[in-house]
Image: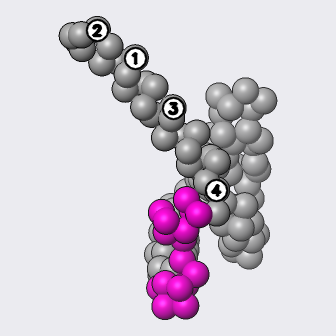
Amino acid sequence: MTTLLLNLRRVPDDEADEVRALLERHDIPFYETRPSLWGVSAGGIWLTRPEDRQRAQALMAEYQQDRGQRQRAAYEEARRLGTAPTLWRRLREQPVQALAMLLAVIALLLITLLPFLTF
């Protein structure tokens, strides 16, 4: 029976590539399902042999801990250099999108609160 090792929803391509390489390096057979056309399924990386499940999960736990440390270090380096993404930086880089989102939020609030407002 196959086992889902990694759901690919919101998984960056580089992380999925690293997981594939990790499984190949340790000779763990797997296959991959692609996301569905309408976004119902995000796809995943599946183990083909049930006996590999424990070993693969242990490898994944170690990998995720290592990746977390690397990502935190990269973020701290970006913060130190002043290149880390911030709310204000994103607003400056995409002012039209930010304004559109703000207007959409205000419109939704008005539609939601309209029955309760007395004029």
**Viewport quadrant of the N terminus:** top right
CB of mark 4 within 8 Å of CB of mark 2? no
Instruction: Tell whether position 81 is magenta.
Output: yes
Label 4 sits on what residue type?
Gln
In-image side of 118 versus 45 (left or right): left
Determine the CA span between mark 4 and mark 2: 34 Å
Give the residues drawn in magenta, as a range: 76-92
Label 1 sits on what residue type?
Ile
Q: Which mark is residue 104?
A: 3
Residue position marked by numbered label 2 in the rendering: 115
**Element type where label 1 sits in the image:** helix
Determine the CA span between mark 2 and mark 1: 8 Å
**Viewport quadrant of the C terminus:** top left
Residue position marked by numbered label 4 in the rendering: 94
Determine the CA span between mark 4 and mark 3: 16 Å
- Mark 2 or mark 3, which has the lower sequence index? 3
The front one of 24 and 87 is 87
CA neighbours of label 2 inside 10 A, class few (<14), some (14 to 19), many (20+): few
CB of mark 2 within 8 Å of CB of mark 1? no
Q: Which mark is residue 111?
A: 1
